[in-house]
């Protein structure tokens, strides 16, 4: 009986540790692993550049995140700095983004499949929120002012909206992955290539096929740079 209990405890511990191990980017086993983007070897992430050839520029980008960006028709612009811009981020499990919001602009409902996001408002006011997973689909929201911080858990649908009709807003977000990914819900559902069957979407949204056709005909602009 004691042996059975010990085995159950050990199994539970191993499952717990294994879950933590795959819950985010892999932990580095050396000081750094600068991405070698020219390597033909395909791995989960990038293989390491020879440390003999690593220099300070592998950890640097003149990103000018202090400068405002032009926004698109949804009224936002996301400037993401991830491993594709700074090779030294490979295996370090972090990236950063500047988000600009026009008056009444929004970063529309989206999800980051690989990362939790922590957002800080630098200028203006933002109405933000996220929705929990099925079956509850609980909506949690908050009005943020300059200096406020809000967390969006990994994988959950979330958004930010600037409710001020006269002034822009700016935020900085840190994300817990070298490549957090982004799936904008409307773009993915109505702007996929090739399109999802209008029969499927009409059934899913309980609307006429003509409504789906109209939505699929719109130009679903990407606000991530």
Image (cartoon, helix red, strand yellow):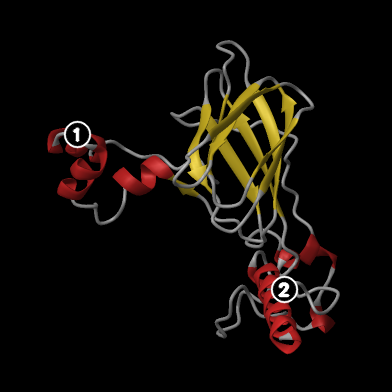
Residue drawn at the location 24% of the way across and 41% of the way down? 216
Q: Which residue is mark 1?
A: 207
Residue drawn at the location 37% of the way across and 40% of the way down? 186
- Looking at the image, residue 135 sits to the left or right of residue 150; the answer is left
Give how far across and how far down residue 223 sits, in percent. Answer: 50, 40
**Which of the 4 quarters of the picture holds residue 54?**
bottom right
Q: Which residue is mark 2?
A: 17
- Looking at the image, residue 179 sits to the left or right of residue 71; the answer is right
Q: Quadrant of the N terminus?
A: bottom right
Q: Residue furthest front?
A: 1
Give how far across and how far down residue 55 sits, in percent. Answer: 84, 71
Give how far across and how far down residue 61 sits, in percent. Answer: 75, 54
**Which of the 4 quarters of the picture holds residue 184?**
top left
Q: Nearer the viewer, residue 127 or 94?
A: 127
Residue drawn at the location 45% of the way across and 43% of the way down? 222
Q: Label 2, secondary structure: give it.
A: helix
Q: Determine the CA span between mark 1 and mark 2.
A: 45 Å
Q: Which mark is residue 67?
A: none
């Amino acid at each position: 009986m004691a042996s059975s209990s010990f085995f159950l405890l050990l199994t539970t511990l191993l499952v717990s540790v294994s879950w933590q191990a795959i819950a985010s980017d892999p932990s580095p086993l050396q000081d750094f692993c600068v991405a070698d983007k020219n390597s033909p070897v395909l791995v989960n992430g990038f293989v390491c550049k020879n440390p003999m050839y690593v220099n300070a520029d592998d950890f640097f980008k003149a990103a000018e995140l202090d400068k405002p960006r032009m926004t698109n028709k949804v009224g936002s612009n996301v400037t993401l700095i991830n491993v594709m811009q700074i090779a030294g981020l490979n295996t370090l499990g972090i990236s950063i983004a500047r988000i600009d919001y026009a008056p009444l602009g929004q970063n529309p409902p989206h999800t980051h499949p690989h990362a939790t996001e922590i957002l800080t408002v630098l200028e203006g006011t933002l109405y933000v929120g996220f929705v929990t997973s099925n079956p509850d689909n609980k909506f949690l929201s908050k009005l943020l002012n300059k200096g406020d911080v809000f967390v969006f858990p990994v994988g959950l649908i979330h958004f930010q909206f600037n409710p001020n009709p006269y002034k822009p807003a700016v935020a900085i977000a840190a994300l817990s992955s070298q490549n957090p990914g982004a799936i904008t819900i409307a773009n993915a559902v109505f702007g996929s290539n090739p399109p999802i069957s209008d029969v499927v979407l009409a059934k899913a949204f309980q609307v006429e096929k003509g409504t789906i056709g109209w939505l699929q005909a719109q130009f679903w602009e990407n606000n991530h740079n």
